[in-house]
Amino acid sequence: MLKNKHLLGLEGYPSDDIQTIIDTAYNFKKVLERPIKKVPSLQGVTIVNLFFENSTRTRISFELAQKRLSADTVNFSASSSSLKKGESFKDTAQNIEAMKIDAVVMRHPTPGAPKHLTDFIDSIIINAGDGTHEHPTQAILDMMSLHEKFGKLKGLKVAIIGDILHSRVALSNIYGLITMGAEVVLCGPTNLIPKHIEGLGVQINYDIDEVIEWADAINVLRIQRERMGRGLVPSIREYRNMFGITRSRIKSHKKEIVIMHPGPINRGVEIDGLVVDGDQTIILDQVLNGVASRMAILYLLCGGKKTDGVV
Amino acid sequence: MSIKKITSQLLLKNGTIIDPFNKQIYLGDLLIKDGRIDQIGEVVVTEDIKEIDCKNKIITHGFCDLHVHFREPGREDKETLETGSLAAMSGGFTRVCVMPNTNPPLDSPESINFIVQKSESCPIHIHPIGAVTKMQKGNDLTEMGLMKKEGAVAFSDDGLPIQDSSMMRIALEYSNLVDVPIINHAEDECLRSDGLMNEGAVSTQLGLDGNLDLAESIMVHRDLELASFTDAKLHVPHVSSSKAVDHIRSAKSSNKKITAEVTPHHLYFNEEALRSFDTNLKVAPPIRTEKDRNALLEGIKDGSIDCIATDHAPHTLDDKETTFDLACFGMIGLESCFGAVNKVLVKQEGLDLIDLIKLLTVNPRKIMNFNTDLFKIGCEAEITILDPETKYIFKERDINSLSVNSPFKGETLEGKIEYTISKNMLFENR
């Protein structure tokens, strides 16, 4: 039903497939609102969640999506893995596949790891984040949330705020949003916005207040505390002062923009707790849409039967 | 592939002889007797001796590669002097210089002697390059004088750039005593950081940590300044960036002792190829932009770059068949060299074949002070017989190295080595 066998990233991903995923996700969202939140769509399908990097929400979101679709799932995380015993990535993947599985959802710290996985095994691969490269399911759930809020993506003004350089969420969002016809502005410290990113069709503006005035929605990225140590950001208070989505900053703008965050949130760093809990954010809708859109992706890639998947 | 000892005489018949030293091209024969050039031109023999029909083939000097890693001692699972020799011969090379980053490194007269002794039984000439500093740690000079006496032809901490400018100055000053080149892998390690590929549009899109071209050019510039100040011989290896070519060009206008090399892979690929995440393309310095590639081609044409060297760097499958961050840096290059550079420089860029051959024969030999007039009667026969017109898809079976980490697999190359003659051995590529 989708043109590609795998979902490795949104670079070059067809717009009608993104729209199909979003439309299908709406159907699955209805399932999640039923008293019995389960459909038999992927009965007999075996999916392995291969997590070589810590993740809470993405792993739980995928696992729930799989369980709601009645798939059989197995979780594998690097901490308990044979990788620590020195087995190679290739051997680990091939051993798991030899046990007869249908699909792999993988999180890996290295860009390109899902692409390498497709060289080693035949299963359907879904990228759940590969280093600072892509995180396509996050971008799809973000786009679904924007679509749900605004009824469209085309022409929407979306700003992504923060550490663009180290963000797979930013890159996948840029690819997806540009493909869907949205306008994208990036905002953050000059050294955390890569020099060559403008080639992807985005605008850059270092003035957060101008960006807020311009935007329909902003996607606020997590500022990782470990980046502070390398001197990429001098201090939390400096970052908060220049780019933080503070309560006073939001109050100073009359325009009511929509505020998103992919989580996990550093309250008081990139965004104030009061803003997080305020009524302009759709952060928890994103989380629910994450399950719905991952159900849609799994169903469309692993299902193969021509129904809307909702039984 | 086959390799045989030549029994007394061998006649190379009816070939196109390209003599890059005397800049001559003519049709003729070449007679080898007891491993030496016996006659060249029109050769008439009455006895019944072994002949190779060289019609439509080029007979030229054996190639010389200033920059290979044969991994011995220490990583004999990747390559040995013996297997490396076969890889070299299948690429038309009869003489190579091996880098000292072995385990242990070649940082003493004893380890230089080990390579020299062990290479004697190999079918090509292998010259060790000694380390500049003990254990390649960048702190203490090696015994360059004693090492040269044992056979070291140059000094380098290849793979580990000499970061300390004062150490580099001392090394260059001291090298004047032994009068051989210092080869510094030019990368500013702080600026390079954890870079896995060239920093630019492609690295931004792939999320791979970038290695800025300035990491190379800043170091090249430092080395050139120090070389001119000390009046030492500096050889810049594997130039990869447009900015470094500019620095070399400008330094060469006033300093004749500076030389530079480029690899076939930097001439052949650009960073777009990395979109495949092929770990065989992970090399140091990285493959850069099309603009950089064009600058390297320009550098060859105007003489800023003196020679081609492969930086043949064998790695096991396991060291490459992994994620991009964990994969080792380097690719093999001896077997694919001529087909790649002939395609790019002669077929695409219109360079004369004899000029390409110079980049592989006379020029590298000159840098290392080896004999360059190989077609003199009585000279030891170091000969390559090739067909520059053969187009073929480079495959794993074309590789004689112990390792197969080549991104050229699957590429259509132009120009094939058919025979290589060295140390009175005849190597045939089949």
Image (tube, rainbow, N blue to C red):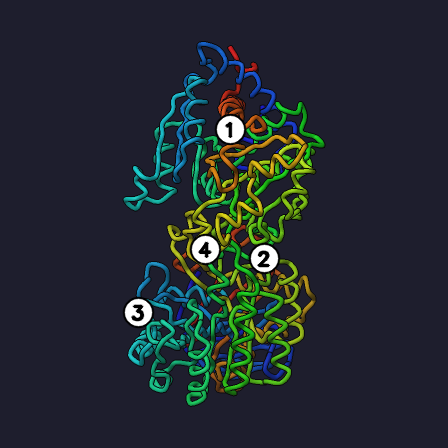
Q: Which residue type carries mark 3? A: Pro
Of the two numbered discs 1 and 4 in the rendering, the one whose residue sits closer to the viewer: 1
Q: Which residue type carries mark 2? A: Phe
Q: Is residue A178 above or below residue B381?
A: above
- Who's the residue at 64% across and 80% down the image? B24
Please name the residue that numbered disc 1 is placed on. Answer: A277
Q: CA distance from mark 1 to mark 4?
A: 31 Å
Please provide percent x and percent y for residue A36. Answer: 44, 10
* Residue B269 placement: quadrant: bottom right
Q: CA distance from mark 4 to mark 2?
A: 34 Å
Please name the residue that numbered disc 4 is placed on. Answer: A230
Have a look at marks 3 and 1 and say if they share a chain. no
Graded by Cα atoms within 10 Å as few (under 14), some (14 to 19) or many (20 or more), the crowding at tag 1 reads: few
Q: CA distance from mark 1 to mark 2?
A: 52 Å
Of the two numbered discs 4 and 3 in the rendering, the one whose residue sits closer to the viewer: 4
Residue in the foreground of this view, choosing between B156 and B4: B156
Q: Is residue B390 found left or right of A98 in the rendered image?
A: right
